[in-house]
Image: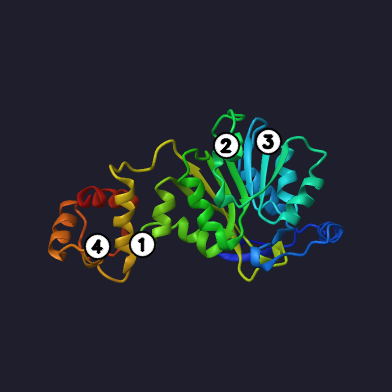
Amino acid sequence: MARRAVSGKLQTVRESFPPAPLKETLHRFKLHPRKSLGQHFLINQRVLQQITSAAELAPDDVVIEVGAGAGILTLELARRVRQVLAVELDSKLASALSQIAAPLSNIRVINADILQVSPAELLWGGESAAFPSPYKVVANLPYYIASAVLRHFLEAQLKPSLMIVMMQKEVGEAIAARPGQMSLLAISVQFYGKPVIVDHVAAQSFYPPPKVDSVILRIDLADNPEVSVSDKARFFEIVRAGFSTPRKQLRNALAQGLGLPPAEVAALLEKAEINPQRRAETLDLEEWAKVGELLC
């Protein structure tokens, strides 16, 4: 099942795959969903089509898929692009997927921890460049590593041009938040690109169903960060300080987090035309850039 918004409410839509093929695949390879790895397999045809549509796939695209699982998304991607690099941590699932994908020459299954291998290593294999950048990331991310995977790609030397990821609803909404509901995670992602929620996905769209709903999140990355800062490490140190005590006024949160006199911080905020009494969640990315430059 999936749910779509209708007149401000969520409407249930029954568009799932027949469960038998997936269960037969799991039975054939003697596999069971592993809760410890956050394995929830997509069984909703409409959601699958939404993911591939949002990715705006072209025949010459190269796609990195994280958490390829039983290959439902992998096979759909392979129909549309030049190469799919399917990364799967679970060695049994990776082995099964290699057999499932064997007839397709444009799928390469990689049994690895995505957080331990760089995009360049995946694309180039440590040898001469096999594929030009940019590439795209399309993935149904395990909830427990979703934020870490985003950071892994966003902070990589070789960044994707586009990311389409399924993740926990609350996390996706936090990433796409606007001023008034901002967080450290939102700033960390929006620094590199523009996130937007494509749609909400009900828990029943997966087997087994997780305890929470999901969202499809699209992140369009620019060639350069969305704002210009002279010292990126210091910029994020300042942002972390601002959110370290989110209920405090920005003047006090920054003073405490950076070890500076509150009066000095207040004066710098006023110079940036930012009210020292505001809270971190109300600042947009451009305002954080101003704060960062004055406090660097």
Graded by Cα atoms within 10 Å as few (under 14), some (14 to 19) or many (20 or more), the crowding at tag 1 reads few
The residue tagged 4 is 254
Q: Is residue 93 left or right of residue 239?
A: right
Q: Are marks 3 and 1 in contact (CB under 8 Å)?
A: no
The residue tagged 2 is 135
| Distance between mark 1 and mark 2 Cα atoms | 33 Å
| SS assignment at label 2 | loop
Label ID, residue 180 = 1
- Foreground: disc 3 or disc 1: 3
Q: Is residue 48 above or below residue 40?
A: above
Graded by Cα atoms within 10 Å as few (under 14), some (14 to 19) or many (20 or more), the crowding at tag 3 reads many
Q: Of the residues under marks 2 and 3, which one precedes in the sequence?
A: 3
Graded by Cα atoms within 10 Å as few (under 14), some (14 to 19) or many (20 or more), the crowding at tag 2 reads many
Judging depth in this view, the residue of 60 and 151 nearest the camera is: 151
- The residue located at (86%, 59%) in the rendering is 24
Q: Amino acid at mark 4?
A: Leu
Q: Is residue 221 left or right of residue 107?
A: left
- In this view, the residue farthest toward the front is 126
Q: Is residue 99 above or below residue 58?
A: below
Q: Is residue 1 visible?
A: no
Q: Amino acid at mark 2?
A: Tyr
| Distance between mark 2 and mark 3 Cα atoms | 10 Å
The residue tagged 3 is 83
| SS assignment at label 4 | helix
Q: Of the residues under marks 3 and 1, which one precedes in the sequence?
A: 3
